[in-house]
Structure formats: C-alpha cells, structure tokens
Image (cartoon, helix red, strand yellow):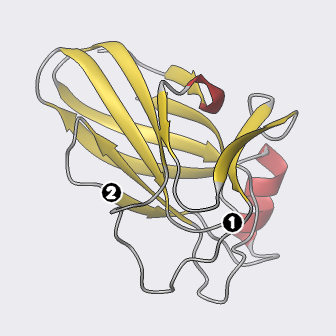
Amino acid sequence: MIKNSKIFAVEYMNKKEAGQASFNTIGGLGAGGNGVTLLPFVPAAAADSSVAGKPRLEYQVDDLKPGPITLLVKCLPTQCTGSNGLLRYSVSVNNDEPRMVNIHTESESRAWKENVLRGYALGRSKHTIATAGKTTIRVYFIDPGLVINELQIE
C-alpha cells in the first residue's frame, strides 16, 4: 500500500456543485499553494449532516492495495462562519459510509494556534480498501467556509 501519498485539492477528477455555490481555486492560499472552496458561502442548516445533495469533489487513486487506510485532509485553519460551531466535511472512499469530520477549533485555543503555526487544520478519517484497483475518494462540503488544500493517504 502507498504510504504518504499526496493529492493536491486542485487535482480532482470530477465535481458536483449544488445551488448557487461553485468550486473555486484560490491561488497561493494554504498548504500546497492552492485552496479549493465553495463561493459564495451558503449557510447550512445547523443539524444538516447529510451528504445528500451536497457539493463534492472526487479524486481517483490507482495503486492502493486492500487494507486499512487513514485519510488526512489538510484545510485552511479558519473558523466556522455560522453560529453552530461546526466546520465540517464528509469523506467516502469507494462508496463506503461517509465519515463526518469537524475541523473547527475555538479561536485562540491551543489547537487553533497549532493549526495556524503549521499552516493547516488537519482532519482524519479511517477507511478500508476492499479490493485492489482504482479507488474513488469523495469529499463533501457540509459547512460554508471550508477550504481544502491537500489529501494524504497513510
């Protein structure tokens, strides 16, 4: 299995946009030099954690072997834009059950300071690759204000 395989956020194979929001690349923003976000910001319902109808980016990896992986997503270390205290994405690998990840940290907290100093907030999810071959990774944008820079497979 690949260790530390990196995929830059701008290297998506497909995208699905929803409503008025569209994916935009912001050059020079965040780890890897480019950030991908949805603009304009469209507030999500506080309790809305479903991926149904959510915008998503799809990535393809060709050389993963069966077994467990950890998917790391490097995001701009920003704050949630709503009052719900959430800055979430959800990720699915080969159509497995999407894993919800909240990267929000409280302003001026130790975790927030660490994120700012290293240049990114880090989300983690665990998945299992069932069969060798092409692997599809879907990243769903749940809350507004999320900017992703890089995916890393461990």
Image quadrant for the C terminus?
Answer: top left
Q: Residues within 10 Å of mark 2 (few under 14, many from 20)?
A: some
Callout count: 2
Q: Amino acid at mark 2?
A: Arg
User: Which residue is depicted at the point 80% across and 63% down?
Assistant: 113
Label 1: which secondary element: helix
User: Residue 55's x, y, as percent?
Assistant: 49, 53
How many residues crowd mark 1 within 10 Å: few (<14), some (14–19), many (20+)? some
In the picture, the disc for residue 37 is none
Given the current orientation, which residue lies at the most extreme bottom position? Answer: 83
The residue under label 2 is 99
Mark 1–mark 2 distance (CA, rounded to whole Å): 21 Å
Q: Indicate which disc, 1 or 2, sits on the residue closer to the N terminus.
A: 2
Of tags 1 and 2, which is closer to the observer? 2
> What quarter of the picture does the N terminus occupy?
top left
Task: Please indicate whether residue 116 sits to the left or right of residue 132 in the image.
Answer: right
Nearest the camera: 96 or 105?
Answer: 96
In x, y percent, where is residue 10? 64, 28
Residue drawn at (73%, 51%) of the image: 76
Disc 1 marks which amino acid?
Ala
| Nearer-the-camera pick, 146 or 108 | 146
From this viewpoint, which residue is outermost toward the front? 20
**Residue that extends furthest to the right in the rendered view of this protein:** 28
Q: In the structure shown, which secondary structural element does the residue marked by tag 2 occupy? A: strand
Q: Measured along the vertical axis of the image, is residue 60 above or below residue 95?
A: above
**Does residue 122 appear to the left or right of 154 in the view shown?**
right
Q: Are marks 1 and 2 in contact (CB under 8 Å)?
A: no
Q: Quadrant of residue 85?
A: bottom right
Give percent across and percent down for residue 106. Answer: 71, 78
Identify the residue position indicated by label 1 in the image.
111
Residue at x 82%, y 76% (from the top left corner): 108
Image: 35 above or below 55: above
